[in-house]
Amino acid sequence: MADKRDYYEVLGISKDATEADIKSAYRKKAKEFHPDLNKDDPHAADKFKEVQEAYSVLSDENKRKMYDQYGHAAVDGNGPSGYGGGYSNFDASDFDFGDIFDSIFGGGVGGGFSGFSGFGGRGQSANRATRGSDILMHLKLDFEEAVYGCEKKFNIDVIEDCDECHGHGGFEKEECKTCHGQGTITTQQQTILGSFMSRQTCPDCNGTGKTYKRKCTECNGKGKVKKNKKITINVPAGIATGDRQRVSGKGNPGSNGGENGDLYIEFVVEEHEYYARENDDIYLEVPLTLTEALLGCKKEIPTLYGNVKINIPSGTNSGDKQRMKGRGIDNKYRRHKGDMYLVFKIYLPKKLSHEQKSLIDKLSKTNLETEETRDFYDFTKEND
């Protein structure tokens, strides 16, 4: 008894849990630790037995009251007789094994479980039309293609119905002799909880219930063939890296008459040599000489929509910005137009002529102090 865990802890519930809470926790834990579903866990059987024992006590109102008052001593011996034997308080209505097996192995085509020896189970039609999966591909654009929009053509392998057999895989259809047209085969298995029937997709007709006397040689009986096709798309202006465009029906094929999936194209935009992009705004570094920065000047600026002349004020410093409203990216994809920002940077010459040095020397003897240089000078003196 001393080694036993608290029953509430075993089920992962609080001591004020309702009857519904207990039942829900039991279903979850039983599914988690059932030894037939956890063959890789050597302790699964012990854990499952522990869960059964906890539920057998806490689901019984009288036993729960005794357990709450006196602990394990009050209910010792009332648990199950042991793994592999009969289980007390096991109610088939509490446990839908159809739900468990469906959630683990998948219902319908591919191995859903049904007819579990009296327990609830749900199967799905093996012939249900299923939509094909989507495909994602990446497409590179240069900077201009993304900004202005463009038409792109590329080749892609797509899976389509075979033209020869019209997607059937063969000729002269007949009922499958293995499953007798049901699309599934049923087998019976024995477990510690009794027998259950498992329903699986028929391997001979792949769930269709039909076979063909003659197999199509064009598609080797698969009904699908791979074709290389040229795709043309119109890329809207303003596309950015990570944006996607859908091409309907060019994904993987569906099954049992289901529609094809879609092709999603995710764009990757290359960087520009001079322009930097941030959302729909454009940044351009504009180089200035020392005299242009000191005296101001007019400068011709290349924008996305042609050259524009602007006035640069005197006293411009490196890092100063000037906004050109509406000169950014005209984003048709998001219906938004950005701005353009000019970022000025002063470049000094590496070498000076004799005349330039003389002029600079004369300039240095004039008073070119600014408020910033005076503040820094005062700060230096304070720390001397």
Image (cartoon, grey):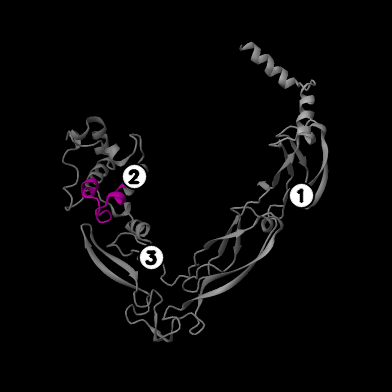
Q: Is residue 289 above or below residue 370?
A: below
Does the CB distance between marks 2 and 3 fall below 8 Å?
no
Instruction: Classify 10 Å Cα crowding around label 1: few (below 14), some (14-19), many (20 and above).
Output: some
The residue furthest front is: 354
Residue found 30% across the figure and 66% down from its top = 198
Q: Earlier in the sequence, mark 1 or mark 3?
A: 3
* Camera-side residue of 215 and 86: 215
Distance between the alpha carbons at the discs numbered 1 and 3 = 64 Å
**Amino acid found under the numbered disc labelled 2:** Ala
Q: Earlier in the sequence, mark 2 or mark 1?
A: 2
Residue 198 seen in this snapshot: yes
Q: Given this view, does label 1 or label 3 mark the residue nearer the observer? A: 1
Q: Which residue is mark 2?
A: 25
Picture coordinates of residue 94, whole percent (x, y): 32, 51
Distance between the alpha carbons at the discs numbered 2 and 3 = 25 Å
Picture coordinates of residue 55, whole percent (x, y): 27, 44
**Amino acid found under the numbered disc labelled 3:** Gly
Quadrant of the image for the N terminus? top left
The boundaries of the magenta stretch are: 29-48
Q: Which residue is mark 3?
A: 123
Q: Which residue is mark 1?
A: 303
